[in-house]
Image (cartoon, rainbow, N blue to C red):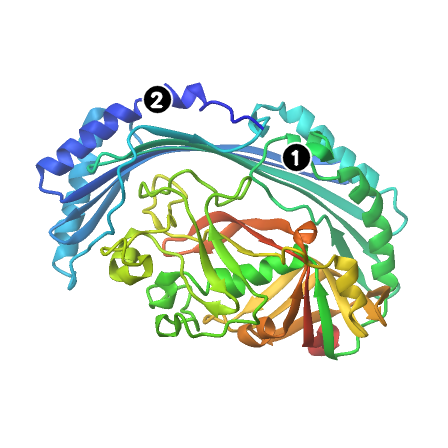
Amino acid sequence: MSRPEVDPTFLALPFRHLGEVALARATELGATHADFRFERVRYQHLRARDEILQSASDVEDLGFAVRVIHRGAWGFASGVVLSPDEARRVAETAIAVAEVAATMTTTPVEIAPEPVHADVTWVSAYDVNPLDVATADKAAVLTDWTRRLRTGAAVDHATAFVMAVQENKYYVDTAGTSTTQQRVRMQPGFEAMGTGADTFDSMASIAPPVGLGWEYVAGSTAGGAWDWDAELDEVPELLAEKLKAPSVEPGSYDLVIHPSNLWLTIHESIGHATELDRALGYEANYAGTSFATYDKLGSLQYGTQVMNVTGDRTHPHGLATVGYDDEGVEAQSWDIVRDGVLVGYQLDRPMAAMKPELAGPEHPQGRSNGCAYADSPGHIPIQRMANVSLQPAPDGPSTEELIGRVERGLYVVGDKSWSIDMQRFNFQFTGQRFYAIRDGELTGQVRDVAYQATTTDFWGSMEAVGGPQTWVLGGAFNCGKAQPGQVAAVSHGCPTALFRGVNILNTTQEGGQ
């Protein structure tokens, strides 16, 4: 797959000149570091219900930001007027903010050094920009999906949607780094809803959001497209079975968990728990802390020896994949959990400077692993999640082989609701569908299921991971963090995995029904 060129309408904008003006003014006023970030982010969201297009929206966010270190403190400001005078004003405002912050900053701000990346360009891997596809064509696909779903006898209503984003960024700093980037991502999906004798339920697509273009919907499966036809045919029957399925008997079960469900457990119990700012307490006021505190690095037994987790900003088609982050740091891949032991964190340049030992002796002042991101030109970059992924076993078993190892258990497919405490330790998750396993065979769906555990007990019960043939890159568009709140897209790859003796709740009974 060849990478397209940067959108010429973005390149025509005056970001280089505005950056030069802003950085010159910040330097003139005494900034020891300054960076300029110019962004244009285009969003489109379409939704259909029961063969009718319900909504279609297009939004564009355009502006720039200046961030400085001055008198040992951060300063930040942003603007939307694309003129040299405004660039100077925004730089002056950032300096003024730092002047105020300096009176309250007890420890001077430092950032880990980064090699200079001068005038580099990076474009994500996709074929067809979904925003270049006619809105009417996309609407026709969605309404057709809902029509096809409603042919199922158990389906009362059906919805379908697509979200598409084109994100363009220009970054330049006083050290000499300058980057121009373009990322495209999209999330199509659908859901069928129906009623049984005594219940209402739904069944949704398990297609993950991806860093791909419209070829994900309209291309061939050999070229990376999801098999929408097969899933559209399957979901009404799956819903009919679910509506008639017996309610689960609570207790201890072995679980075989498909990547379409396990990605979310990884996100909540590993991804957030290993953000260094959270582990050090910097997110405690809003998002919480982490049980995986810094003193446990190198000693915390996170899970079994088959557990190997990486942070990755380079994986093709990952939602958090970039060429360079919002601090000019080149994308990297690194270990977070190795052989079940916590060995790394996700960090940006300020966090890297605070804990330089994480980078090893070759980087005595520390090195960021490229996890700074801001979701708009009006927000300051913060430490955000990489593509955090559980690695498969090189010669590992198939999903069917893992199921065959279970005498009494459940096979879990698709994500749904979740709950986890502010230390990312106690949790419970539900799913789209649960199949009973008896003597190594699937015996039909059961309902009202949630699995419950602590993070270390859960990953400590993982007996086996599947091979590369079971590995799927899942993820979400809507990971939230910080005050003011920011949203980031992130992927999590994982294989099918086998867990022993996990506590299963009956959600209907737990709800007092």
Would residue 370 be found to the left or right of residue 60 on screen?
Answer: left
Against 104, is 192 above or below? above
What x and y, as percent, mark residue 385?
A: 45, 53
Q: Which residue is mark 1?
A: 216
Image coordinates of residue 47 in percent, x first then y, are: 66, 39
x 21%, y 25%: residue: 84
Q: Which label sits on residue 13?
A: 2
Looking at the image, which residue is at 88% across and 42% down? 151
| Marks 1 and 2 in Cβ contact (< 8 Å) | no
The answer to which image quadrant residue 83 occupies is top left
Q: Residue at x 56, y 27 (%)?
A: 129
Q: Position of residue 162 (x, y in %)?
A: 63, 38
Decide which of tag 1 and tag 2 comes sooner along the chain.
2
Tell me the amino acid under the disc marked 1. Answer: Tyr
- Is residue 416 or residue 174 the one in the foreground? 174
Element carrying mark 2: loop
